[in-house]
Image (cartoon, rainbow, N blue to C red):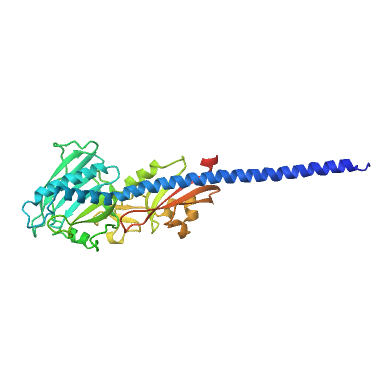
Amino acid sequence: MGCLTLKATIGALTAATVIVVAAVCLSITLTVSLNAIRDIGKGNANALVKGAYAGLQQHFANPAHTAEYIQERALAERWVWPSYNQANASVFRDRAVNAVKDASMMHRLSTDRFNLFWADGSRAGAQAQRETDTLELENSTATPGAILAQGNRSYYNLSNSRPLPDYSGSRAPFVNYIAIGAYPAMAVRITDNTTGLWIPPIALAETDGRVSINYPGLIPLRGGLPNSGALVGILYISLRSDMLKGFLLDVKATPNTESMLYDRTRLVVATTIDFENQETIYSTIPDPDSLPAGCLSVGGQRNAVRCLPYISNLSVPAFDAVSSDEAFLFNTGDATVRLVKADGGYSYVAQAFVRKPLSGLDLFVMLQVPEKDVIG
């Protein structure tokens, strides 16, 4: 057997070295390239969640903007706030109805109800009925001590605000909101006569029989004539969870992107995920006061109950991967993104806090974008 020459040995070692170096360089190149692509993916997810919370912040800012608009209009038109001692208060309630109508049309895509509850038990209100593309206005005047009030309702096309004089709407009686305790119950929540707040969600029966969950906000109306600085009324406003879900669907960037809006209890307010029990009607709950967690009933009715899911109910592996990390889940700083491995793949999970001018309801938005949607 012949011996290897020095030249052959050096050649073999050189070739082996080249192969090793090439392999190392290729590995480094692939790693750097993958990291660069992942950085781009994180940037895209970050931009998406920032766009989502910016839009949601605008939705939840509507109550404060509307209160400012109504109070500025009241000052400009020199409203005399209603009281039992003012015989001409109906004139100013008529002006208030027009202001509520304008506010409702302005925010019809994001807000469900605008109601001005006066300190004398009467109301000027508007409700967007999207199922029939109708805006209902109510103007009622209360009498001291009486449960029922006097008033009228008018209807407009929700898309173009044209009057609907022949529309057959609600025949429900008008009520004195002082006499039934509704106004005092709202007023007691506004402790400083200045700051509005979100109150716990409520379930409402819609005209088509569905049960919707609404997120109400209360804002005090102060001052004006004749009692400058006094609490003279309360603006009640509500956002419907279905509308929030529609907004989340608008920011679905890739075919497999999913998002959710949730609170500090991990209850999912709105989500793009088709959750089969997101709207559940029960007929056998023996006690409406003992509803399952996340469920709300309409006026204590056992057969009109809607339940929202918790994060764990959604069964999204990427969300489950971060659900135990409260620092990430309830982050109130800048938007943040993580790359997580779940269900055999990687996903970008982005989170942001939804800042709002009213207190009382902390909400967070989270979305997941599968890595394969970004890099294939």
Farthest right residue?
Answer: 1
Question: Can residue 275 be seen in this snapshot?
Answer: no
Drawn side of residue 238 relative to residue 230, left or right: right
> Depth check: 118 or 201 in front?
118
Q: In x, y percent, where is residue 21?
A: 73, 44
Drawn side of residue 267 relative to residue 198, left or right: right
Q: In x, y percent, where is residue 145?
A: 9, 60
Question: Can residue 348 be seen in this snapshot?
Answer: yes
Residue at (19% x, 39% y) in the render = 156
Residue at (16% x, 55% y) in the render = 224
Q: Quadrant of the N terminus?
A: top right
In this rendering, the answer to whether 135 lies above or below 292 is above
Drawn side of residue 213 relative to residue 31, left or right: left
> Depth check: 323 or 55 in front?
55
> For residue 30, what is the image quadrant?
top right
Q: In x, y percent, where is residue 206?
A: 25, 46
Farthest front residue?
Answer: 76
Q: In x, y percent, where is residue 329?
A: 44, 56
